[in-house]
Amino acid sequence: ETFCPGGDFASAVANVLDILEKGKMGDAFDPITQDALMTDYQKVIDEAKRIADNCDDPEDAERLRKRIEGCEALIKEVDSLAKQLQSNPDDQELKNKYKETCDKLHQEIKDLADDCTRCLAKQREKAVINAMVVANELMDRSRAQDVPGVDALKPEFAQACSDVHAAAISVGSDCADGPKSQAVVDAAENFQSYSPVLVSAARLAAKTGNAADQKHADLVKGEWDRRLATVVAAMDVAQGKPGLAAAALERRLADAMEKAKAAAQSGDEAAFKSHRAEVKHILDRVNDVLDKEIEACEDPALGNELKSAKADIAAAQPKYFAALDAYKASPTAANRATLEAAEKTLSQAVNRAIVSLGGENLEELERRLKEEEAERERKRLEEEERLRQQMLELQRQEEERKRKEEEARLAAEEARRLAEIAEREAADAAAREKARRDAEEAERLAAELAAQKARIIEEDKVIVYDAPEKLNVGDNDIGKAAQDLHDTANKWDDSENDLIAIFKKISENFAKMSELQNQSTCKAELIALSKEISADAKKAAKIANMFTKECTDRRLTADLANTVGKIETIGTQLRMVATVKASMPDDKSADEQMTVCAKNLMEACKECVGGAHACSIKSPKGSTPNIKWRKMVYKQ
């Protein structure tokens, strides 16, 4: 799992790089493009988090996490700017800031993807080197006829081979070239299937101690080495980045040399042997990458540069191992100084080779990362300062508010004090003062009454002192609904409102219908009332439609239009049901249907009153000259 990116990681990175390339060609970044990219950004970020969690190099893991924090902060900033642009689409300064932030985000995502790729490459190279070291240890135990040692190493060897297989499958899945990808997969499968053969041969040789069996085990080891080399070569071809492959080994080499030096100093023979072999394998791997690139290079100048780098490594390598062995034999200060000088020379030679292959100089990378960290810290401090200034401003405003409140309180206290003085001074003229207060009270009441009248006139309210009389209705659901509609209509003056007048008429006709509902001898009257109610419903719907044409609020218009449609439909249904009821007066089903139609129609009429009044408020003044809405205020 450590080596395999999640689902669409490779395609997401490819999309990001494609957008970056388009941006370089002059295409403008816009919110729509940004929304389309967010999914790919999140895939890269999610995969980077998983890689950071599984990375065994603390520095690489910390670098990825800091890069992820920077990307997430930029995404939040882009979202904020996009929302501001929706409110101010013509703000050129905001547009420029939005594009600048988008460019930073795109580049930061690309750098994050590069860091992920570097980290995965280091993990893959580590898997290859680890497999080599464990295989050599397995053969050493076999030659020593250490059967328990071979058995104890089997799980570690199996895991090392599985790591190489997983790394190769990951490289193959990321490669867009079909034949190259298949070559990696085939090599990985061949290698994985042969690994148990090496374990069996090594154990047999350790168990028998027979020279022929040991020779056979050595031949199997040679074939295993060849298959591992085939996997490595296929991965190098599929990746197409020799600098990346070599750069992944640089920190591994530094760690291995440091561990070898520590083991030499401590005298731990097994650890020294293991770490020395690891250094040798890493250098062999670097030389192998150089050989392949020199063979494929068509640029004479670059070819000479690569040959020179390889020669430097070849010259520094024996000196390093000689110094390491000398320090192991005698860990003196002088030998340590000689070893550290040899380490430095070898490390510089490897770094020059990596730069020649197109990799990134380790010192330059560290410097760039430190600059990025310093820039993030500077921005964080600027944000903290901005928030501090904002907090100070809020505190200043709060202090100013409290000061004004205190001044107002002192002014009120001073006014009360002066009023008390005035009252004491006027104590000797109590009668005159009483008369003055009575006059003022009368004036106040008159002013209040005038204001109330003016307010009522302004709101077009009609004061009616006597409450309207109740309808004579039957003791049934239709009668109750008719009274309810009548009460609703009576809240408005119908003298200049045809809609209210019609609804009052409908409620009165329904009241009559409620009295006739259970009488079997009133067939003609029931049919006549239903026809009249249906006709009035159509008139009311026609008047209400005027409001839907003039109202500027779409929601109110839609609601009223829906209510008008119900009035027309239910009015027609009522006429039909009433006819059925008249022909079958004892049919309970017809009773129920007529009751439901009547209640629904009156409920729709009540909704129409509220909807028409709301639409009239949202209509141009004078758009419905024959309809005036005056509220009826009844005496309590």
Image: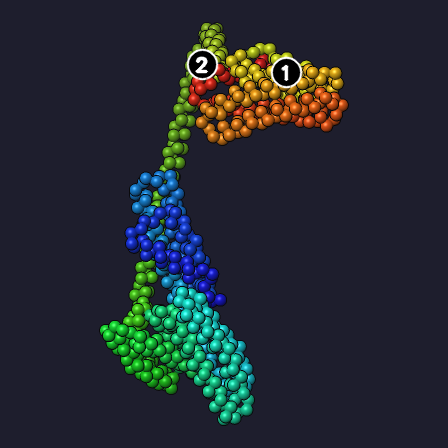
Residue identified by numbered label 2: 423
Q: Is residue 562 above or below residue 371?
A: above
- Taking depth in this image into account, of 591 and 209 the one nearest to the observer is 591
Q: Residue furthest left?
A: 301
Q: Amino acid at mark 1?
A: Glu
Observer-side mark, 2 or 1, equals: 1
Marker count (numbered): 2
Q: Residue at x 63, y 18 (%)?
A: 531
Q: Position of residue 374 (x, y in %)?
A: 33, 57
Q: Is any atom of residue 85 visible in this view?
A: yes
Q: Residue 599, percent across and down?
A: 65, 25
Residue 337: x and y in percent read: 31, 79
Q: Residue at x 49, y 86 (%)?
A: 141
Q: What is the distance, in whole Å, between disc 2 and disc 1 at their CAs?
A: 63 Å
Per the image, label 1 sits on a secondary structure element best described as helix
For the C terminus, give its image quadrant: top right
Q: Which residue is mark 1?
A: 508
Query: Which residue is at 68% across, 22% downward?
Result: 578
Q: Are marks 2 and 1 in contact (CB under 8 Å)?
A: no
Asked whether, in this view, residue 461 is left or right of residue 604, the answer is left
User: Which badge, 2 or 1, comes first in the chain's sequence?
Assistant: 2
Residues 179 and 19: in front is 179
User: Seen from this angle, which residue lies furthest bottom?
Assistant: 211
Query: Can the viewer see residue 323 in this picture?
Result: no
The quarter holding residue 540 reads top right
